[in-house]
Image (tube, rainbow, N blue to C red):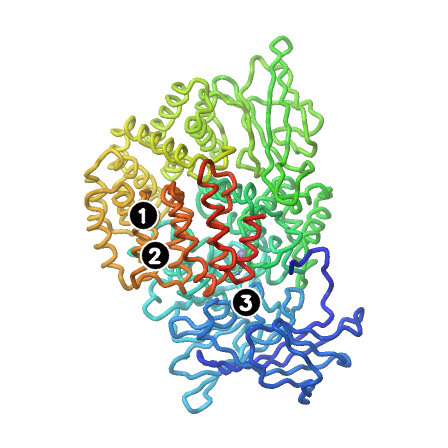
């Protein structure tokens, strides 16, 4: 079926040791001349040369300067085959490509008069003939020639070497990348850009010139991203000892971009939404997102670029590790507790759903048809959790030694997950062979804890069992090696010092390796209150039968802030799903705890805001065997109403008390205040049909956080001023596509059946630009991922709306279409007629999609 298997890996028969490329750039027709220095693998002496290439018009082909006769090579849909080559040689090819016709945004494409590339994972083959796999790592020299008027800025990987005039209005620039680099990290940008720049001394004493580029009108909004680059560079030196390795580091913002950003060597290309920010157009969350993505791409320079991947099955080796690194960056610079809560929210809502749905796959999948379909939450977020567990198992100091060894040993190489684990095993003396199962086994492990207290002897026993449910293609699972933190508290919430006489483990962390473990604690005066998985050190679903009052106590006394938040999430989940026998006591415990938090001025307001947010729809859907959409949405709404009603005065008081702090700029205290204020406002607006407070905040707003927070309340709570506010907002930002995406996302995520009509109306306006991935996501991503009420409309209208648009989108940008299809991943667990309705919609898509991306997704969804 066209699948590629991890077990079939073979080293490349031919390597490219140096690539010298010349581009005659033009949006309509670009000519690419490639001089590739080729070397055969001595172990595969007679293997033919096979070069990847797609949509290339071949103009000329030579070996060592001599034209190749037409019977000496063969071209098919995927490649160029040359047989009978006699050892090392230089292949020169000339091809023509059409950037303007490239809607897939893979390879070289045009966007708003400029030219950009996107080569990960297999886009370079759309630029020229090449051995397009990550374990082929030439050094590079890149010469760009173009008209100066339209393309005054010519950027490529590496260091600038030379630039000059060519006459006739044309000019050139030559770049050199001395580091062995796979083709997926190749990049070129040409266009009329401005930049903000700075110079920084590297830890090795050399200087690096940093620049962030954007369309001229957007340059003033690049300052924050530039600061984020500076912070990332310093942090990687200090925390990981990683020093930058070129004289320049360029970042360019593109409005048309499939994903978030791309870590091309020395020339990162970003979705404009992760670069451009000022107070008028960006929310606090946008600022945080920019810093985190800038960090992520910068950190790839070592985890991904200097040490790259042997093959695409190892994708999490760079992505999981780099997400872990960017999470630590944010945690070191801002609130560690709030960052962990945000990350675990995402993991539980989206990665756990992926792991439990039709698209579940291991962090290192054994096979794939289209690698683009594996840039998933499992590869990224679960991959990061695995690295985090390693960090927990080894501790910061030994983890750092392991990382240093990994980087030193694999620098300039294409590595595997085994190389990563071997470095950590060697540096720490630990056996990580069982731990490696995390990469091979899909599904979220369930850890169930039962306890017993023998009052006579004062002996407390914990029975801990782990089990991983079946996933597609993996019916049986073996036990995993995982760290589990725990603590015991007495009835007053005081931490008990424990001395576990267990099979293994000690102190407040044990390591699970078997399906069952027993821990015994002696000499306890009374039954303790246990707490587990502090900091969410293992990415598992942990079940322990807490009473509401125990959770209320934990929410106050747990030392670990993550677990204080988690106790409230558990309490809220239990109330919503009616898990507690004494429902009234549970509701009262939750309301009391939330009331204390609203009043608690000693607490970080951002943390309080996180505690006031109930588990979202996706997280709740993950906690039940069968998804009753109406029941989940109804229960959530009822509980939110109850919280608002119970605490209206407190919420109002706190909302106003935070006003002064919220009026500040980007300092953490002001951001935190705005966050809690917007949560208070949302609850208060539930009770106020006139939405006076939200209207007042909207009218007086001086920051996008305040303006959008208020607009969201007006729109999502159907306030009378909703349409006027939307129109005012749309008018104010009509020329700004990123802010326009924000209001479109609000409209498409309005929890009202009419959101489907609004989306249909949008399709009929000029705002619907199916070639722009951000806009497609704002409309259809928001509907399918952020609006369960409308998406799961009982008659199936939401499913039909998404499905209707997919064939057209698939013909434009298959990656975007395939990702939208993943919105159906949990369909098999839908209760009632909804499951049948999705099934019919998926069946209706049969024969209407054409890309390998969407065909693979559809097949996996329906398998
Ligand atoms: N490594 C990159 C992932 C990526 C990508 C980015 C943009 C367009 C298409 C893409 N395919 C894969 C981004 C990252 O994870 O850092
Ligand atoms: Zn990445």
Q: Would residue 332 be visible to someone looking at this image?
A: no
Which circle's residue, 1 or 2, is located before the other in the chain?
2
Front-most of 392 and 576? 576
Question: Quick check: 44 left or right of 855?
Answer: right
Numbered mark located on residue 9 in the image: none
Residue topped by disc 3: 119
Residue 412: x and y in percent read 66, 64
Question: Quick check: 21 left or right of 739?
Answer: right
Residue topped by disc 1: 755
Q: Residue 220, located in which quarter of the rendered image?
A: bottom left
Front-most of 152 and 15? 15
Residue topped by disc 2: 741
Say if disc 1 is inside 8 Å of ligand 1: no
Query: Please, what secondary structure does the residue beneath circle 1 have?
Result: helix
Residue 125: x and y in percent read 58, 71
Which circle's residue, 1 or 3, is located before the other in the chain?
3
Q: Are marks 3 and 2 in contact (CB under 8 Å)?
A: no
User: Residue at the location (25% across, 44% down)?
Assistant: 714
The residue at the far bottom in this view is 167
Q: For mark 3, does the 10 Å Cα neighbourhood hold few (<14), some (14 to 19), or many (20 or more) residues?
A: many
Residue 694 versus residue 739 in the image, above or below: above
Q: CA distance from mark 3 to mark 2?
A: 26 Å
Q: CA distance from mark 1 to mark 3?
A: 36 Å
Q: CA distance from mark 1 to mark 2?
A: 15 Å
Q: For mark 2, does the 10 Å Cα neighbourhood hold few (<14), some (14 to 19), or many (20 or more) residues?
A: many
Front-most of 362 and 416? 362
Say if disc 2 is inside 8 Å of ligand 1: no
Residue 27: x and y in percent read 44, 78
């Amino acid at each position: 079926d066209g699948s590629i298997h991890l077990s079939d890996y073979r080293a490349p028969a031919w390597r490219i040791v140096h690539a010298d490329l010349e581009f005659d750039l033009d949006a309509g027709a670009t000519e690419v001349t490639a001089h590739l220095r080729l070397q055969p693998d001595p172990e595969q002496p007679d293997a033919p040369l096979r070069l990847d290439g797609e949509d290339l018009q071949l103009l000329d082909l030579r070996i060592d300067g001599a034209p190749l006769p037409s019977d000496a090579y063969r071209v098919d849909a995927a490649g160029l085959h040359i047989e009978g080559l006699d050892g090392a040689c230089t292949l020169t090819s000339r091809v023509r490509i059409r950037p303007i016709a490239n809607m897939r945004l893979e390879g070289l494409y045009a966007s708003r008069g400029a030219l950009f590339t996107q080569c990960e994972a297999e886009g370079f083959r759309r630029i020229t003939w090449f051995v397009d796999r990550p374990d082929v790592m030439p050094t590079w020299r890149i010469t760009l020639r173009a008209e100066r008027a339209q393309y005054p800025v010519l950027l490529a990987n590496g260091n600038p070497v030379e630039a000059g005039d060519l006459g006739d209005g044309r000019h050139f620039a030559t770049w050199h990348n001395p580091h062995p680099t796979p083709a997926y990290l190749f990049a070129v940008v040409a266009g009329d850009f401005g930049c903000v720049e700075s110079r920084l001394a590297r830890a090795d004493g050399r200087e690096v010139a940093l620049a962030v580029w954007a369309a001229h009108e957007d340059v003033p909004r690049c300052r924050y991203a530039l600061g984020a680059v500076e912070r990332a560079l310093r942090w990687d030196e200090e925390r990981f000892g990683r020093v930058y390795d070129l004289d320049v580091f360029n970042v360019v913002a593109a409005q048309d971009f499939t994903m978030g950003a791309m870590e091309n060597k020395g020339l990162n290309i970003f979705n404009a939404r992760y670069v451009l920010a000022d107070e008028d157009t960006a929310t606090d969350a946008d600022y945080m997102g920019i810093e985190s993505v800038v960090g992520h791409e910068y950190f790839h320079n070592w985890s991904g670029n200097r040490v790259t991947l042997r093959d695409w099955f190892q994708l999490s080796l760079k992505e999981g590790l780099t997400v872990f690194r960017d999470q630590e960056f944010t945690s070191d610079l801002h609130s560690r507790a709030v960052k962990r809560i945000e990350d675990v929210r995402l993991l539980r809502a989206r990665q756990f759903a992926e792991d439990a749905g039709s698209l579940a796959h291991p962090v290192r999948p054994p096979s794939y048809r289209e690698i683009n379909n594996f840039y998933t939450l499992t590869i990224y977020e679960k991959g990061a959790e695995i690295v985090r567990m390693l960090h927990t198992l080894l501790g910061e100091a030994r983890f750092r030694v392991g990382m240093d060894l990994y980087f030193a040993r694999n620098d300039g190489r294409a590595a595997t997950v085994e190389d990563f684990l071997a470095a950590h095993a060697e540096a720490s003396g630990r056996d990580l062979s069982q731990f490696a199962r995390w990469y091979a086994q899909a599904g979220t492990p369930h850890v169930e804890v039962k306890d017993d207290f023998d009052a006579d002897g004062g002996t407390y026993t914990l029975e801990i069992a782990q089990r991983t449910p079946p996933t597609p293609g993996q019916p049986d699972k073996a036990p995993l090696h995982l760290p589990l933190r725990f603590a015991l508290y007495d009835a007053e919430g005081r931490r008990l010092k424990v001395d576990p006489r267990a099979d293994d483990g000690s102190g407040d962390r044990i390591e699970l390796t078997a399906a069952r473990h027993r821990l015994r604690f002696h000499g306890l005066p009374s039954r303790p209150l246990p707490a587990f998985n502090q900091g969410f050190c293992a990415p598992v679903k942990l079940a322990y039968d807490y009473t509401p009052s125990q959770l209320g106590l934990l929410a106050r006394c747990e030392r670990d802030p993550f677990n204080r938040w988690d106790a409230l999430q558990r309490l809220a989940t239990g109330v919503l799903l009616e898990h507690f026998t004494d429902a009234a006591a549970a509701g009262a415990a939750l309301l009391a705890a939330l009331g204390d938090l609203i009043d608690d001025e000693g607490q970080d307001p951002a943390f309080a805001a996180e505690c006031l947010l109930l588990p979202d729809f996706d997280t709740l859907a993950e906690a039940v065997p069968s998804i009753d959409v109406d029941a989940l949405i109804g229960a959530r709404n009822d509980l939110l109403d109850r919280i608002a009603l119970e605490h209206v005065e407190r919420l109002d008081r706190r909302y106003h008390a935070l006003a002064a702090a919220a009026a500040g700029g980007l300092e953490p205290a002001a951001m935190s205040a705005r966050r809690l204020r917007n949560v208070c406002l949302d609850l208060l607006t539930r009770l106020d049909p006139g939405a006076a407070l939200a209207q007042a905040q909207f009218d007086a707003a001086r920051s996008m956080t305040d303006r959008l927070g208020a607009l969201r309340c007006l729109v999502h709570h159907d306030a009378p001023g909703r349409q006027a506010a939307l129109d005012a907002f749309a008018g104010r930002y009509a020329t700004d596509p990123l802010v326009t995406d924000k209001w479109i996302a609000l409209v498409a995520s309005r929890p009202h059946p009419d959101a489907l009509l609004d989306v249909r109306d949008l399709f009929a306006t000029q705002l619907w630009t199916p070639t722009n991935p951000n806009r497609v996501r704002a409309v259809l991503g928001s509907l399918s991922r952020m609006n369960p009420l409308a998406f799961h409309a009982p008659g199936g209208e939401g499913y039909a709306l998404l499905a209707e648009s997919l064939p057209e989108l698939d013909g434009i940008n298959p990656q975007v279409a395939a990702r939208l299809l993943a919105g159906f991943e949990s369909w098999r667990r839908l209760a009632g007629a909804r499951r049948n309705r999705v099934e019919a919609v998926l069946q209706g898509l049969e024969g209407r999609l054409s890309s390998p991306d969407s065909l693979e997704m559809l097949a996996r969804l329906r398998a």
